[in-house]
Image: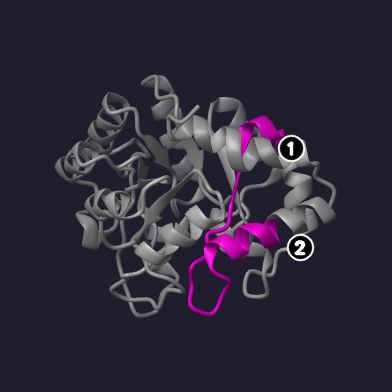
Amino acid sequence: HAHYGPDPFAARKVDALKGAQIAREAGMRAIVLKNHQYGTASLAAIISKAVPDIAVFGSICLNVEAGGLNPDVVETAAKLGAKIVWMPTQSSNYDYMHNKMRTGGISILDDKGKLLPPVEKILDIVKKYEMVVATGHLPVNEAFVLVEAAVSKGLAKIVATHPLGWKVDTYFTIAQQRRIADMGAFVEYCFVTTIPEGGLDPKEMVAAIKAVDTHHCVLSTDLGQANNPAPVDGMRMMIAKMLSCGLTEEEIEVMVKRNPARLLGLD
């Protein structure tokens, strides 16, 4: 979970090509290219040829600019090799409500709290192509409905995205983190929430990880912003900080290597 250029709206620390080169030099096995506004599968396919010896995967966030809750867009991304489908992030109902310049936003639920039919179809496509579905920036109540539906359809690769974010409606309690993990989701903890702009005490993240159990967790950086460390540097910083806050090397290996490899089909 990291952000690379080109990006239509935000300055990024490195572009996707340089990011893949740096990750390969650092000995990383794989990266996933994420962008809020467009699917990255075709970009990943080209970079994979330019930068051998590291797996470069594409993904798609179901925001307005990328097509929203459109099953055809998701199937096209899948056929191009995308590995992860994020539910709406910057176009989520919650993100729109808290941005004074925008109104509206995407909810995955109807007015009765049921999953919308296009989302049902998207989950079927995710299962068909053995992709990962992630909750994106959904509020907690929508995230639980999504995970319940994904589990009921037999999806094996589900991620609850940064539950310790700085947005109140997307902040999971410890009990909620444990419950969504027990339902079958990996809980993803992102280092960006602990650096100054995030404001989260890294010890709080470690406490949550220990409460949930590392075998149900993923550690990522969510970095790539121009004013933050580059993703690979951030990964090193995150590992060092997590070790200093009480996680063991074995626990970190599970969360930065084994569980991500399982999600991406590399195990």
Quarter occupied by residue 218: top right
Q: Tell me the residue at 42%/45% (across/down).
A: 53
Examine the rendering and report whether any part of residue 165 can be seen.
Answer: yes
Q: Is residue 68 left or right of residue 235?
A: left
Where does the image place residue 12, in percent across and percent down from the top left? 42, 74
Left or right: where 203 falls relative to 96: right
Residue drawn at the location 42% of the way across and 57% of the way down? 20
Picture quadrant of residue 17: bottom left
| Amino acid type assigned to the residue bearing label 2 in the image | Asp
Mark 2 and mark 1 lie on one chain; the one further toward the N terminus is 2
Residue 229 to residue 222: above or below = below
Kindly identify the amino acid type of the residue bearing the numbered disc 1.
Glu
Q: Which residue is mark 2?
A: 201
Determine which residue is flagged by label 1.
251
Closer to viewer: mark 2 or mark 1:
1
Q: Residues within 10 Å of mark 1 (few under 14, many from 20)?
A: some
Question: Quadrant of the rendered structure where residue 26 is?
Answer: bottom right
Instruction: Judge by depth and name the residue closer to the eye, 130 or 13.
Output: 13
In the image, residue 191 above or below residue 121: below
Q: Which residues are magenta?
A: 210-238
Instruction: Pinpoint residue 3: horizontal percent, then vertical percent.
Output: 43, 63
